[in-house]
């Protein structure tokens, strides 16, 4: 009977790390026409590494110490990378007050009497002063594929940290498999356009960059209003609203608790090709039922 075939497909999926929350999700997965991917932690490993620390004022060690202190309140992959580097260098972190993470932008807190901010160049330029010369240096680092986080102290740029996050090993082939199935793929990222375009060209995916978390969900909603069936794949860090807005929200690679709650499905082994496998499983199962 129909329910038995669906139940069998759901458990076959689960055995290979493709979790779907029920038959309706399984059915819907095979109908997806556009799939939007988050970049960090989804198309990339999500384990960026610090490639350089720049000091515009004071020492590089001091920039890293303050940046790491700020990142203690964040679970963003950038935060984990900066804390790891500070740990390797044996830095003792100062006390922090009024810490808060600003989704898709960065983190802010009061440290040693100064209001500090660490985040994207765009967010930093809105909140303080980044000189034309500093902006030029940082843009060149982005064009090399780095994500750049600027450190502001009382609104003045005092340094920057550059990071690099490698694409997942199967990202290019996984996206190609989706295209073979007639599915349009799209990368939605809060990262800067220069870095994002570089990654997009490398992986063969259309790119929408410099998005805020709400922009990601607006794009998903707009595609659905055009009558398309839209999937969203992400890790739930800054993209939970977009996962919720999609016809099928898919949490990737373990993901955050938020992602698993919001998502309709999860891919446990962090393979981009598993998105194609989920669609294949759905299409085969539904074809056999009909
Ligand atoms: P993505 O779409 O790649 O997952 P996010 O939306 O999570 O990116 O973040 C967008 C940008 O905001 C990052 O590339 C980074 O510049 C900045 N940012 C966000 N959170 C942090 C943080 N905790 N520390 C430093 N920078 C951050
Ligand atoms: Mg993210």
Image (cartoon, grey):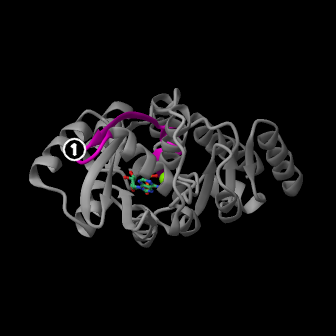
Q: Is residue 51 part of the magenta span, yes or no? A: yes
Q: Residue at x 51, y 55 (%)?
A: 94
Residue 212 lies, with reference to residue 282, above or below; the image says below
Tell me which residue sits at (65%, 50%) in the image: 255
Q: Is residue 61 left or right of residue 230?
A: left
Q: Residue at x 36, y 46 (%)?
A: 63
Return the x and y of residue 277 as percentages of the image width and height. Answer: 64, 38
Task: Give SS at disc 1.
Answer: helix
Q: Position of residue 131 (x, y in %)?
A: 13, 55
Q: Is 187 positioned to the left or the right of 132 in the image?
A: right
Position of 178 with respect to 133 (left or right) is right
Instruction: Identify the residue under disc 1.
Output: 138
Image vertical order of residue 78 relative to residue 15, above or below: below
Residue stretch rendered in magenta on the structure: 33-59
Give the x, y percent position of residue 142.
26, 41
Q: Is residue 78 left or right of residue 209?
A: right
Query: Which of 202/290 is in front?
Result: 202
Q: Quadrant of ligand 1?
A: bottom left
Using the rendered image of the protein, determine whether residue 217 is visible from the camera's viewpoint.
yes
Using the rendered image of the protein, determine whether residue 34 is visible from the camera's viewpoint: no
């Amino acid at each position: 009977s129909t329910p038995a075939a669906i139940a069998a497909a759901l458990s076959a999926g689960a055995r290979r790390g493709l979790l779907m929350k029920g038959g309706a999700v399984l059915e819907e997965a095979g109908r997806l026409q556009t799939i939007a991917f988050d970049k960090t932690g989804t198309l990339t490993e999500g384990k960026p590494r610090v490639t350089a620390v720049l000091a515009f004022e004071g020492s590089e060690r001091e920039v890293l110490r303050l940046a790491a202190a700020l990142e203690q309140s964040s679970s963003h992959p950038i935060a984990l990378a900066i804390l790891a580097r500070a740990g390797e260098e044996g830095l003792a972190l100062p006390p922090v007050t009024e810490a808060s993470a600003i989704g898709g932008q960065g983190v802010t807190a009061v440290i040693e009497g100064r209001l500090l901010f660490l985040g994207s160049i765009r967010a930093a330029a809105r909140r303080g002063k980044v000189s034309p010369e500093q902006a030029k240096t940082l843009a060149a680092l982005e064009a090399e594929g780095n994500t750049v986080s600027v450190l502001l102290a009382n609104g003045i740029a005092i340094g920057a940290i550059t990071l690099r996050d490698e694409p997942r090993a199967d990202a290019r082939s996984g996206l190609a498999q989706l295209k073979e199935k007639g599915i349009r793929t799209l990368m939605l990222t809060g990262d800067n356009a220069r870095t994002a375009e570089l990654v997009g060209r490398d992986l063969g995916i259309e790119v929408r960059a410099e998005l805020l978390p709400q922009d990601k969900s607006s794009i998903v909603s707009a595609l659905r209003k055009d009558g398309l069936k839209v999937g969203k794949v992400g890790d739930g860090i800054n993209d939970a609203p977009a996962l919720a807005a999609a016809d099928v929200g898919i949490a990737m690679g373990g993901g955050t608790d938020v992602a698993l709650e919001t998502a309709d499905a999860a891919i446990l082994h962090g393979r981009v090709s598993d998105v194609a496998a989920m669609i294949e499983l759905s299409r085969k199962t539904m074809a056999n039922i009909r």
